[in-house]
Amino acid sequence: MSGTLAGTGRARQAAAGDLPGGSLAAVRIRGLRRTFGARDVLDGLDLDIAQGEFVALLGASGTGKTTLLRILGALDRHDAGTVLVPETRTVVFQEPRLVPSKKVLGNVTVALPRGPHTRETGRRALAEVGLEGHADAWPGTLSGGEAQRVALARALIREPELLLLDEPFAALDALTRLRMHDLVGELCRRHRPAVLLVTHDVDEAIRLADRVAVLRDGRLATDERIAIDHPRDSADPRFAALRTRLLTELGVHRAEPVPQPTRDTAPATAKESPA
């Protein structure tokens, strides 16, 4: 395998660079290539993510979104290019992936070294996601939204420099998903990791991210900063305009607007029947 996957503190300094505004890069990818058989899923991809920046990645199924996330999380290899990432990385998957034999508190602290303050640290993490009363619950008793909150607490308890989100809201109902959006946005602004969210949901990407990118043909087809203050309203014309641009990049054809009746074309009203 050619290329570099660096995860040390020294490598992190190597990744720090001259991003716009003088920001330091937590993630720096140059010329990334990943091949499956004869197909280049990632083909010379370049991407920077600054410290504390939230980037959402959109793309059709099979375009390599999850492959990129897995490479950044050291769950897959790459065939060429350079990948510079911080040492402390955590992943939240679409499924919570809780350990059934451990209670909620044990799941949250599973990656922490044992010590006198471990349980207290875990309880604080649960309080952050609104589950302070569930420390002694078993995973099987949780709702889907509660289980995903536990997974989020487990990811953030280590104070990661890079948080990878692999469609973590896809299996949730619409209302729970919106609540999770608010929670994740609040926690990421508080903890300030670099974040890469992989999603198929355009509104979700716009609602949460500082930047949104579209992956197509193994490279970024677009990479746009979102100049809308939080909290973002989907009724905002800027939100709607960005949604339209992104859907166009994704190859989704919008329906033609239905013509509104004018005075000359207004439908005739039924005549009154004679008495």
Image (cartoon, grey):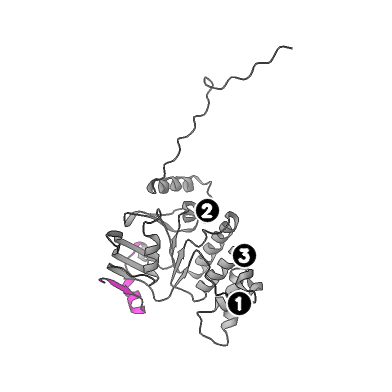
Q: What amino acid type should be assigned to the residue bearing mark 2?
A: Arg
Whether residue 24 is visible to the viewer of this picture, yes or no, is: no
Which residue occupies the extreme right position in the image?
275
Residues at discs 3 and 2 in contact (Cβ within 8 Å): no
Residue at disc 2, secondary structure: loop
Name the image quarter holding residue 151: bottom right
Name the image quarter holding residue 127: bottom right
Which residue occupies the extreme bottom position in the image?
116
Residue at disc 3, secondary structure: loop
Which residue occupies the extreme left position in the image?
2
User: Which numbered dot is residue 143?
Assistant: 3
* Distance between mark 3 and mark 2 Cα atoms: 27 Å
| Residue 24, image x, y percentages | 37, 69
Q: Which residue is mark 1?
A: 103
In primary-sequence order, the first of circles 1 and 2 is 1
Q: Is 267 within the magenta? A: no
Q: What amino acid type should be assigned to the residue bearing mark 3?
A: Ser
In primary-sequence order, the first of circles 3 and 2 is 3
Q: Which residue is mark 2?
A: 232
Look at the image and tell me in which quarter the N terminus lies.
Answer: bottom left
Residue drawn where x is 29% and y is 65% of the image = 30
Q: What amino acid type should be assigned to the residue bearing mark 1?
A: Lys
Q: What range of the chain is rendered magenta?
A: 1-20
Of badges 1 and 2, the one in the foreground is: 1
* Distance between mark 3 and mark 1 Cα atoms: 14 Å
Q: Residues within 10 Å of mark 3 (few under 14, many from 20)?
A: few
Residue drawn where x is 65% and y is 16% of the image = 271
| Residue 54, image x, y percentages | 44, 62
* Distance between mark 1 and mark 2 Cα atoms: 36 Å
Q: Residues within 10 Å of mark 2 (few under 14, many from 20)?
A: few
